[in-house]
Image (cartoon, rainbow, N blue to C red):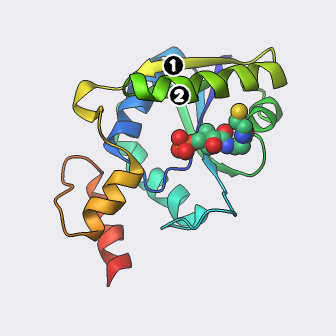
Amino acid sequence: MRRAIFPGSFDPLTNGHLDIIRRSAPLFDEMIVAVLNNADKRPMFSVEERCEMIRDVLPSVETDDCNMMVESFSGLTADFARARKATAIVRGIRAVSDYEYELRMALMNRRLEPGIETVFLMAGEEYSYVSSTLMKQVFELGGRVEGLIPSIVEERMRQKKK
Ligand code: PNS
């Protein structure tokens, strides 16, 4: 059984994340979308809200026979992956600028857990500039984000703003 985790902050989930989920699903039997409970940051959405939104959106994504789960975690990604008996950590790469940070993380995670490989997938080029941070910024300043984040997420962002 091939189980992977797809870790991230997902604050909030973007269509770029969904693109990575869709692309990686055929490679695994099970995938856990692992939402970091980052207590030191000030996220727009609580970890419970982020998990709930991902659970709401996932049924609309073509994930073949891959069994998708959503869980929150604290601490090290490598520890969470080992605890869940995952053999792979999925990460998306949008552009060369992501590479250095992702390489450092992958090497550190491999040092921590040599039996777990990081699997990189290239995001669709239409999402190469999409990040949660940019989406929040554009939304806060009244810019259009349709097509870049799921409509459920956009609606939740609108409610937050009120
Ligand atoms: O959504 P992001 O910010 O790209 O996700 C980054 C994430 C959550 C994968 C990374 O910050 C992480 O793994 N954090 C957990 C703590 C940890 O394991 N740190 C060492 C990574 S080598």
Residue beneath the point at 69% across and 63% down: 39
Give the residue at mark 1: 120
Distance (Cα) linking label 2 and label 1: 5 Å
Tag on residue 56? none
The residue closer to the viewer here, 105 or 24, is 105
Tag on residue 91? 2
Q: Is mark 2 within 8 Å of ligand 1?
A: yes
Horizontally, is 54 left or right of 155 in the view? right
> x%, y% of residue 147?
19, 47
The kind of secondary structure element at disc 2 is strand
Q: Is mark 1 within 8 Å of ligand 1?
A: no
Residue beneath the point at 37% across and 45% down: 131
- Ligand 1's image quarter is top right
Horizontally, is 52 left or right of 88 in the view? left
Horizontally, is 98 left or right of 162 in the view? right
Q: Work out whether residue 88 can be spotted.
A: no
> x%, y% of residue 104?
65, 25
Q: Is residue 40 above or below residue 149?
A: below
Sequence-first disc among 2 and 1: 2
Q: Is residue 41 above or below residue 25?
A: below
Horizontally, is 68 left or right of 125 in the view? right
Mark 2 crowdedness (10 Å alpha carbons): few <14, some 14-19, many ≥20: many
Q: Is the residue under label 1 in contact with that under label 2 (CB below 8 Å)?
A: yes
Mark 1 crowdedness (10 Å alpha carbons): few <14, some 14-19, many ≥20: some
Residue beneath the point at 40% across and 22% down: 96
Type of amino acid at the residue the image marks with label 1: Phe
Q: Is residue 43 above or below residue 8?
A: below
Q: Quadrant of the N terminus?
A: top right
The kind of secondary structure element at disc 1 is strand
Type of amino acid at the residue the image marks with label 2: Arg
